[in-house]
């Protein structure tokens, strides 16, 4: 079985299985099976797969057809131009969350130190550390997620401190210049409406936030004034249709700013402690 034939076969199987972008997915999975980058596939279409490479590729295709996200199969996801390790214990970083980084750099580029609440893979904390030179702190309620974030920080060269706690209960008062967060914001009632890749594979603790989807927003906004220094900033990702309620929660803050994503949907909100 050559690379070219394997790609054609894998693309057909994924297409018949209703998997999005089947050709790209087949390329990513085959490159992972070969321990090569995708460019190798185009440069060596005649490469004959070994028995082990074919077995790995077949297993990856089977897992993807069962709904397992490609990122959990390869264990990798790019964020802000860097490759992060991801496991089933952390939410897969989305391109939309890069707007949180952009907003934080706009309003508080000189912030020292920084806190990332609900860090997951560490994407926000590590990116801001590497973009600003700050030493970030990060919290997560999941010890397994904290371990993934720590490994990513070490591999990417970010000097960070990670605390396992609920929201920011373990962070002392008046200690941060900037708090960032991509909190859980999916209402529990919307669980069945999610894509199966999200609903069945990504950690629910990182997805769902009570009946209305605002439980974690409420806790962050309530506790942030204790943790932030005067003039400190809070920057959070917004869920779909959550802008009005989050703006209400931030009613006592100043210089509130909202950043839309590329589709024009409000994606990030920032506000400054009075």
Image (tube, rainbow, N blue to C red):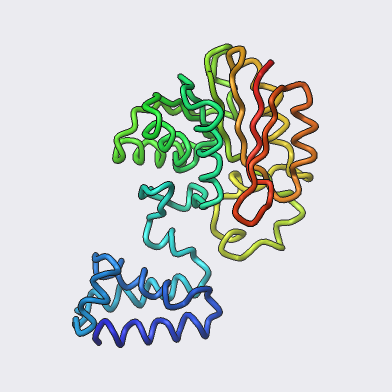
Residue 222 against residue 56 in the figure, above or below? above
Image quadrant occupied by the C terminus:
top right
List x then y, in percent, for residue 214. Answer: 74, 39
Is 206 positioned to the left or the right of 148 in the image?
right
Labels in figure, total: 0
Residue located 29% across and 40% down the image: 155
Q: Name the foreground residue: 43 vs 218.
A: 43
Is 198 positioned to the left or the right of 72 in the image?
right
Residue 81 against residue 234 in the figure, above or below? below
List x then y, in percent, for residue 106. Answer: 53, 32
List x then y, in percent, for residue 156. Answer: 31, 39
Q: Name the foreground residue: 10 vs 94.
A: 94
Q: Name the foreground residue: 95 vs 202.
A: 95
Q: Name the foreground residue: 270 vs 41.
A: 270
Residue located 64% across and 32% down the image: 270
Instruction: Tell me which corner region of the image, top left, top right, bottom left or bottom right, holds residue 5.
Output: bottom left
Is 265 positioned to the left or the right of 162 in the image?
right
Instruction: Tell me which corner region of the image, top left, top right, bottom left or bottom right, holds residue 197.
Output: bottom right
List x then y, in percent, for residue 241. Answer: 76, 49
């Amino acid at each position: 079985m050559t690379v070219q034939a394997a790609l054609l076969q894998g693309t057909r199987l994924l297409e018949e299985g209703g998997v999005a972008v089947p050709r790209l997915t087949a390329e990513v999975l085959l490159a992972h099976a070969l321990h090569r980058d995708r460019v190798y596939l185009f440069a060596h279409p005649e490469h004959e797969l070994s028995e082990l490479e074919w077995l790995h590729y077949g297993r990856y295709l089977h897992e993807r057809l069962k709904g397992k996200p490609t990122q959990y199969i390869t264990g990798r996801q790019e964020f802000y131009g860097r490759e992060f390790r991801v496991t089933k214990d952390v939410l897969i970083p989305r391109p939309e969350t890069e707007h949180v980084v952009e907003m934080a750099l706009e309003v508080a580029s000189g912030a020292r130190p920084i806190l990332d609440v609900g860090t997951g893979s560490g994407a926000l904390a590590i990116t801001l550390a590497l973009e600003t030179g700050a030493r970030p702190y990060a919290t997560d309620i999941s010890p397994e997620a904290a371990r993934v974030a720590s490994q990513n920080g070490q591999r990417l060269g970010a000097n960070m401190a990670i605390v396992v706690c609920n929201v920011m209960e373990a962070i002392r008062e008046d200690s941060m210049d900037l708090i960032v967060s991509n909190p859980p914001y999916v209402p529990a009632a919307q669980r069945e409406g999610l894509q199966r890749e999200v609903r069945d594979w990504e950690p629910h603790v990182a997805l769902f936030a009570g009946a209305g989807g605002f439980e974690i927003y409420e806790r962050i906004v309530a506790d942030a004034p204790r943790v932030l220094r005067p003039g400190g900033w809070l920057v959070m990702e917004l869920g779909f249709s959550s802008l009005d309620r989050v703006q209400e929660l931030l009613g006592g803050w100043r210089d509130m700013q909202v950043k839309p994503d590329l589709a024009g949907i409000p994606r990030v909100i920032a506000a400054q402690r009075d």
